[in-house]
Amino acid sequence: MLNIGGLKEGIVLDHIEAGKSLEIYYHLGLEKLDCQVAIIKNAKSNKMGKKDIIKIEGGLNHIDLDILGYIDHNITVNIIRDNKIVEKKTLSLPHKITNVIPCKNPRCITSIEQGLPHVFHLVDEAKETYRCMYCEEKYTK
């Protein structure tokens, strides 16, 4: 059994769908942080069969819950202080996401104006469908 030490202070992202941890790592910009990050892939899970886990030492202010909620709103966010879980956050699909998915419409203003943020609004929660703020291009996960 693999043993990864506990955290004194930080965040544990649990119940990540197996294989999605690196996508989350890069979307959250964790490679730019100067703190310890442990990625556990394909951990055994009674609930999910297999899951990924990400442990981030410190980094409490660096996690964008909207990005996490968009990638997988079933992830559990555990806040650790003094080696104990002090808070569990559940995620939901964000109503608006910025610069997470690019608009694929070649006629969209974001294709012409390079500095514009790519902003999508949630239009159908059941189908996890978003639309571009500028051109209404549909994006479904």
Image: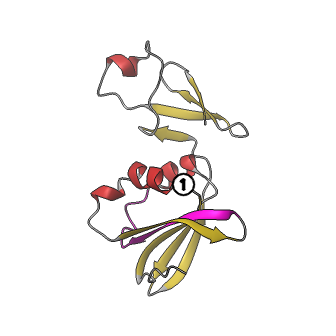
Q: Is residue 15 above or below residue 4?
A: above
Q: Is residue 59 above or below residue 67?
A: below
**Residue 43 found in image quarter:** bottom right
Describe residue 117's horizontal placement relative to residue 104 as left or right: left
Say how the picture is coloured: secondary structure
Q: Is residue 132 above or below residue 28?
A: above
Mark 1 belongs to which amino acid?
Answer: Gly
Q: Which residue is mark 1?
A: 19
Instruction: Tell me the crowding category of disc 1: few under 14, some 14 to 19, or many 20 or more residues within 10 angstroms, Cα based.
Output: some
Residue found at the far front of this picture: 1
Residue 112 is situated, as x and y percent measured from the top left of the image, at 33, 16
Q: Quick one: SS at disc 1?
A: loop
Q: Which residues are magenta?
A: 48-63
Residue occupying image coordinates x 49% and y 40%: 97
**Residue 115 found in image quarter:** top left
Residue 63 is situated, as x and y percent measured from the top left of the image, at 42, 59
Describe residue 12's horizontal placement relative to residue 72 as left or right: left
Viewport quadrant of the N terminus: bottom right
Residue 42 is situated, as x and y percent measured from the top left of the image, at 57, 64
Q: Does the magenta segment cover residue 49? A: yes
**Residue 122 found in image quarter:** top right
Q: Nearer the viewer, residue 118 or 30?
A: 30
Total label count?
1
Q: Does the magenta segment cover residue 23? A: no
Residue occupying image coordinates x 50% and y 18%: 135
Residue occupying image coordinates x 31% and y 57%: 31
Viewport quadrant of the C terminus: top right
Q: Nearer the viewer, residue 33 or 4?
A: 4
Residue 116 is situated, as x and y percent measured from the top left of the image, at 34, 27
